[in-house]
Image: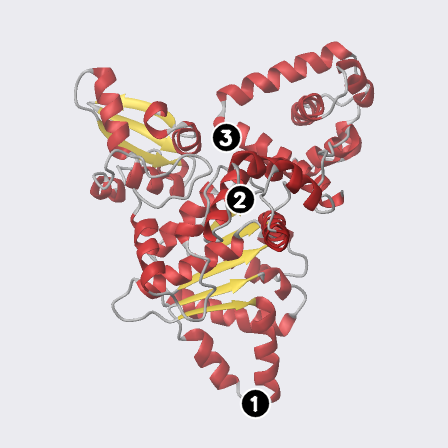
Amino acid sequence: MRDTLGQVSYETWIGPLSFVAMNNGTATIEAPNRFFRDWVSDRYLDLLRHSLSAEVGEPIDIKLTFGKDAGAPANAHAATNGNTSSGGNGHAPKGRSTNAGNGVAASSGESSRRELHPGLAPRYTFPEFVVGSSNQFAHAAAQAVANQPGEKYNPLFIYGGVGLGKTHLATAIGHHLWATSNQRRKVLFMPAEVFMNELISSLRRDKMGEFKEKFRRVDALILDDVQFLAGRERTQEEFFHTFNSLHTDRHQIVLTSDKVPRDIPGLEDRLRNRFESGLIADIAPPDLETRVAIIQKKAALENLPLPAEVALYIAQNVSANVRELEGCLTRLAALASMGKTAITTDFARQALRDLIRTHEIKPDIESIQKTVADFFHIRLADLKSKKRTQHIAFCRQVAMYLCRKMTDSSFPAIGEAFGRDHSTVIHAHNLIARRIGNDSAFRFSIEKIERELKATHANAA
């Protein structure tokens, strides 16, 4: 299956699955959550069935479950949609945009050429979104919502740092919803700050009836940067009622933010609960391969001849977000055009010398300790203490592993920072490395901590 799907799609969608049991010719396989179960059922069920049947030597049926329904009857969705896959290759290889093999991406590509929502950014469509391991989950969730608005994952809450593609995905959903319905769906895209300003204006002019009519009669409401609602009680109250009205009528709600709901300060509990009631998907900073693909795709859109080595040079030195990559490309294009100069690596190095960082700044041991402590919700003092309770000892081992992986510190130096000897650090490193290799869910958690550390130091540089 890994050979068929490619490494990224395999690790993203098949790796997290767990084999539960085989009874009467039916294999029960458990997914981490409902979204995983539905996605695997839609895209990879046939491939799972064929692979298992080939190994067993007789036809095998698949029963897909997730944590809550592991003991329940086979899910009707899985049974009815099991044949929608044409071999399971629902994703393009890592770093490539998915333009085929997936209904929403293909139809979105056609609609982007044919017609787009006049009120949305024209370039923010599914075909122009470059998919990599850092955003694959959010991209898949956006496609699911675009295909079945109001039915699955409502609301869809996409969060991540600045310039990573949240607005792009949210806008792509809007374009697709508007272009693929027989009767034009009413799609309203709005930054949260504009929502607040319209509310204030309506209150001032005593036109709340018009305000409610505008926001509660749409088929899809996309609210960008909802963290700006924090601390604004009257705005949160009105949005709470708007949310309830739309959700009751099964109209799609898409929200973006730079933080998960629980980390937005000043957000009322009732709104936080509603934000968390749907699907929450994160977008992390893109990896090197995805950054190269993004640069190449945007250069192609601008008809800019860009050698592969120049794309690699930019990608190696700009890692914070997509907007920085775009900024570098814009400057290159402008300077090359003005000077009628060919774009080479030397030219790029000179032209971008004040925009890119030539050396990655690595986190230090202290910042790793603090980030790990925050991630696992323990005190930093406990992490560095002599306490040996199971949870604290485990968190300490994770921190030691990351210190060895992400810094140039030796085992003895790391041990000294934790008040331990080097043999303890070696043991912790080997233990965590083995678990990462055997436990996909745990590996994702470690990768998330690494991304947070890299993003923090990229922003601080």
Q: Residues within 10 Å of mark 3 (few under 14, many from 20)?
A: some
The amino acid pointed to by label 3 is: Ala
Up-down relation of residue 53 to residue 92 (above or below): above
The amino acid pointed to by label 1 is: Asp
Work out whether residue 59 can be spotted.
yes
Distance from label 3 to label 2 (Cα)? Answer: 30 Å
- Which numbered dot is residue 191? none
Which of discs 2 and 1 lies nearer the camera? The answer is 2
Indicate the secondary structure of the residue bearing disc 1.
loop
Precedes in sequence: disc 3 or disc 1: 1
Q: Quadrant of the N terminus?
A: top left
Residue under label 2: 295
Position in image of residue 200 (x %, y %): 61, 80
The outermost residue toward the front is: 340
- Which numbered dot is residue 441? 3
Precedes in sequence: disc 3 or disc 2: 2
Which of discs 3 and 2 lies nearer the camera? The answer is 2
